[in-house]
Image (cartoon, rainbow, N blue to C red):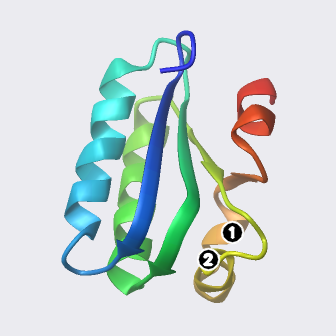
C-alpha cells in the first residue's frame, strides 16, 4: 500500500503456472485499495506469457466492473510491453512507466 492505494508488484515469470497467483494478488489489491484504483507494477517481470495476458485482461475487466480501474506499470525495455502490444491490450489498459507516474495520474 502507498497511502490509500494498493500497489501489486509482480516479478519473475508470469506463465500458466503463475498467472493464477498474479490474478489473485491483483484481486487482493482491489479489495484493499481505498483510492478508487489499483496499481499493478510489472517492471520486474522477465517473461509474460499468454496465461499472464489472459489473467491481466480478466482482472482488468473485473476492476472496471468495480469502478476501480487498474493502472499498469511497464518498462518499455522489459519483456512485458511486446506481448501487450501484440495482444492489443496496450490499447485498453492504462499504462505508465513508473509507479510514481501511475500514482500521480
Residue 33: image quadrant is: top left
**10 Å crowding of disc 1: few (<14), some (14-19), many (20+):** some
Residue 22, image x and y in percent? Answer: 31, 56
- Residue 84 disc label: 2
- In the rendered structure, are the residues bearing label 2 and label 1 in contact, judged by CB atoms less than 8 Å apart? yes
Question: For the image shown, how many numbered marks are present on the structure?
Answer: 2
Note whether 50 is above or below 45 in the view shown. Answer: below
Note whether 78 is above or below 64 in the view shown. Answer: below
Between discs 2 and 1, the one toward the N terminus: 2
Residue 51: image quadrant is: bottom left
Residue 12, image x and y in percent? Answer: 41, 69
Residue 50: image quadrant is: bottom left
**10 Å crowding of disc 2: few (<14), some (14-19), many (20+):** many
Q: Is residue 100 left or right of residue 84?
A: right
Which residue corresponds to the image point at 51% horizontal and 77% vertical from the top-left? 46
Residue 62, image x and y in percent? Answer: 37, 45
Q: Secondary structure at mark 1?
A: helix
Q: Is residue 16 left or right of residue 87?
A: left
Which quarter shows the C terminus?
top right
Which residue corresponds to the image point at 65% horizontal and 61% vertical from the top-left? 92
Q: Secondary structure at mark 2?
A: helix
- Residue 90 disc label: 1
- Residue 49 disc label: none
Residue 80, image x and y in percent? Answer: 60, 75
Which residue corresponds to the image point at 49% horizontal and 40% vertical from the top-left? 64
Which residue corresponds to the image point at 38% horizontal and 30% vertical from the top-left? 30
Mark 2 and mark 1: Cα distance apart in space? 5 Å
Note whether 36 is above or below 97 in the view shown. Answer: above
Q: What residue occupies the far bottom of the structure in this picture? A: 86
Amino acid at each position: 500500500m502507498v497511502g490509500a492505494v494498493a500497489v501489486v508488484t509482480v516479478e519473475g515469470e508470469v506463465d500458466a503456472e503463475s498467472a493464477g497467483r498474479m490474478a489473485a494478488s491483483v484481486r487482493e489489491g482491489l479489495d484493499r485499495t481505498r483510492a478508487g484504483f489499483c496499481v499493478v507494477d510489472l517492471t520486474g517481470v522477465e517473461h509474460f506469457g499468454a496465461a499472464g495476458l489472459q489473467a491481466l485482461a480478466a482482472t482488468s475487466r473485473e476492476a472496471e466492473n468495480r469502478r476501480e480501474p487498474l493502472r499498469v506499470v511497464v518498462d518499455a525495455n522489459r519483456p512485458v510491453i511486446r506481448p501487450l502490444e501484440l495482444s492489443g491490450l496496450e490499447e485498453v489498459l492504462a499504462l505508465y512507466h513508473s509507479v510514481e507516474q501511475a500514482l500521480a495520474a
